[in-house]
Amino acid sequence: MEIRKSDLPRRATSPHSGKINFELRISLIFILLIAGCASPSEPFERKPPVARAITDLAAAQSADDVVLTFTLPTETVDRLPLKQPLAIEIYRGIGTPGSESRAHMSLVATLPAASVDQYSAQGHVRYADSLKAEDFASRDVVGATYAVRARASAKRDSEPSNAVYLLLRAAPDPITDLKAEVTRPAIALNWSAPGKTLSGSAPAITGYRVYRAETEAAPSNAAETPNLKTPLAKIGESESPSFRDTQFEFGKTYEYSVRSVIGSGAESLESADSNLAIVAALDTFPPAAPLGLVVTFVPQQGDTPGHLELSWSISPETDIAGYNVYRSEQAGASETRLNTELLLTPAFRDMNVEPGRVYFYNVTAVDRSGNESSRSEAASGNVPAESQRTP
């Protein structure tokens, strides 16, 4: 209802005109309110919320993926708080290096609002766009441009984010035949060099990076995933398809992965992880046999009868738990162990000898895992017949 100035009553000139004008104004307002309520009004259409554009999109290649990261907007373009979850649309354009135009970009992925939480943490999104062979079209390097939109309603998207341009290279195929073998000085890793990339060409491998994690005991089923005690971390590099891990510890279980590398320095690109090689570093390797065994006759001194004393060189190995002493009365005959507990020092006193007899001795070393070395070279000793014990 439109109210014109000529429709208003004229101002009165009587002494009571002020009071009358006031009453007329009140009446007019009342009439207008009634007329407004009585007349039909146009339906009110609420404007759909439009999220503010994302401004911090970043992209980096990792093996055959492009990892996109950005922050979800929290306000509308009207600077009102967004109360509904956002859907995300991801756009990509691929062409020859240097083609940065958005004109050829197309929608490659949509993250529904219900699933965005799977890719985000505290409002920061991380999404991996997996590359395919057709993206390279038999080329080793292509140019790619990425942009994203946030959608708060089905009717309107946000403006496009900042565009990110990068060069993509065809990464080497993952290594598939990594093997690990426990030896005494090292865990030996071996694998075959990958023969191709997504583009189909042979990769120019510049080296390999070796990663290791400590795990629980190896799973009985190959399909099971081991429980990691430590995260997978790089422990070394190699120029050839082999590596020796000398920094391991017996008694632990390890998981290994190897990645091929092309390029160098800041321009290097790793392949995806190889197959995982899980190995239990069990110490089944006996120590070396002791050296320098010497047998010496010690005559009777006071109440101590004549006897034979044995000594040998201390083992240089760091995990020796002790030594055993064996004796026989004929060379090559079966031996009897003389000590009931491991000897902690490289020495032994044989008090159970008889005058006039010859004895043959061997010693062994035992490590902390219970592995016993082979016998040392034999050494003999005898107690002279005239060295009778004093009754």
Image (spheres, rainbow, N blue to C red):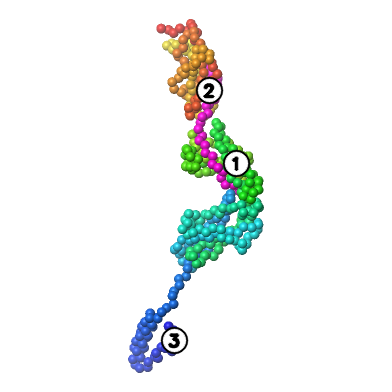
**Residue in view at x 61 percent, y 54 percent:** 135
Residue under label 2, please give it: 374
The quarter in which the C terminus is drawn is top left
Residue under label 1, please give it: 237
Q: Which mark is residue 4?
A: 3
Q: Position of residue 375 (x, y in %)?
A: 53, 20
Q: Please identify the dominant SS of the magenta region.
A: loop
Q: Is residue 192 above or below residue 314?
A: below
Q: How many labels does the image show?
A: 3
How far is disc 1 from disc 2 in space, using C-alphas? 37 Å
Q: Position of residue 49 (x, y in %)?
A: 48, 67
Hey, which quadrant is residue 55 in on the image? bottom right
**Residue in view at x 45 percent, y 13 percent:** 352
How far is disc 1 from disc 3 in space, using C-alphas? 88 Å
Q: What is the span of residues highlighted in magenta in the rendered image?
A: 266-295
Q: Is residue 373 above or below residue 144?
A: above
Q: Quick one: label 1 or label 3, which is nearer the N terminus? A: 3
Q: Quick one: label 1 or label 2, which is nearer the N terminus? A: 1
Q: Where is residue 278 in the image (x, y as percent from the top left)?
A: 52, 39
How far is disc 3 from disc 2 in space, using C-alphas? 119 Å
Q: Quick one: label 3 or label 2, which is nearer the N terminus? A: 3
* Tag 3–tag 2 contact (CB < 8 Å): no
Q: Is residue 372 above or below residue 25?
A: above
Amino acid type at mark 1: Glu
* Tag 1–tag 2 contact (CB < 8 Å): no
